[in-house]
Amino acid sequence: MWLAWAGTLAFVGLIELTVRIGILPERFFPAPGTMAVTLVGQFASSVFWMALWNTLWTWAISLAVAAVLGVGLGIAMGASRYVYSALRLIVEFLRPIPSVALIPAIILVIGVNFESKIVLAAFAAFWPVLIQTIYGMHDVEPVALDTARSFGVGRIERLTRVALPLALPYIATGIRIGSAVALIIVVTMEIVVGVPGLGELILIARQGANVEVAYALILASGLLGWGLNTGFARLEARLLFWHPSFRSVTP
């Protein structure tokens, strides 16, 4: 862990140095120290906290929708080869579509509002959750299922008491990846369309040529993403401590 922090500090120090000695023009690339001070100054603004709340609230709803739909459909496709065969081509067709490319269509159908952010972010976050859930269900050891079957355990119980618990690490990873994707799409939508949130503040700062504030808000978005990812990783390790893949993980 200390190597990660050392590498990060060295990188930040290098950027600070290149800006201070003029290699990078401070007009376009504020020094990290300047960004940090500007970001701390934003903490005193209620506008910042309202924007942060808008972004987080949209992210949470989008991720919840993606998790429910992705896990539900993933279990169905992973547990039944008939469902998998019926839906595989549809999934393979829709999954590669860039979420950002759907912005014009979503605006046309839904409008520029809170709901449009949710739909786009949920669509983007849905795919990693779905794919990881399918992988998890397919990776369940056949021996475990055969053993349960030999003891007279029914199909539904084999799914809920054997297959699903063994697939949980995959599902948790999918939700964690979906969390990052949802945040990226939410902030992107706010920047491109101008709906309330951190992205809208970045857009306003850019339009006003306030470079330091724009970079400070970008830094805030990055720190938010890092914090959410770290939180999910620690939560995985704590909740799935019983699984072999997490027994050596120290949260």
Image (cartoon, helix red, strand yellow):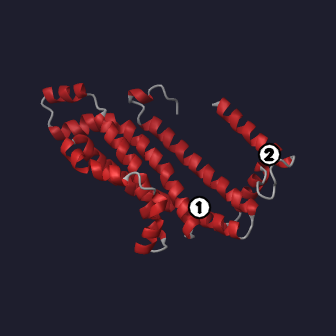
Give percent across and percent down for residue 118.
44, 63
- Is mark 2 in CB contact (under 8 Å) with mark 1? no
The numbered mark at residue 18 is none
- Residue positioned 38% across, 38% down in the render: 170
**Identity of the residue drawn at 62% across and 51% down:** 222
Q: Residues within 10 Å of mark 1 (few under 14, many from 20)?
A: many
Residue nearest the viewer, comparing 1 with 209: 209
Residue beneath disc 1: 52
Q: Amino acid at mark 2?
A: Glu
Nearer the camera: disc 2 or disc 1: 2
Query: Helix, strand or loop at disc 1?
Result: helix
Q: Is residue 131 in sight in this rendering? A: yes
Whether residue 152 sits left or right of residue 140 in the image: it is left
Is residue 115 among the parts visible in the rendering?
A: no
Q: Secondary structure at mark 2?
A: helix
Q: Is residue 232 left or right of residue 157?
A: right
Q: Which mark is residue 16?
A: 2
Q: Residue at x 62, y 63 (%)?
A: 49
Binning the other alpha carbons within 10 Å of mark 2 as few (below 14), some (14 to 19) or many (20 upward) gives some
The part of the image, by quadrant, that contains residue 160 is top left
Residue 66: where, in percent of width, then height? 39, 54
Q: Quadrant of residue 240?
A: top left
Left/right placement of residue 85 relative to residue 59 reads left
Is 199 situated left or right of 149 in this image? right
- Residue that appears at 70% across and 57% down: 215
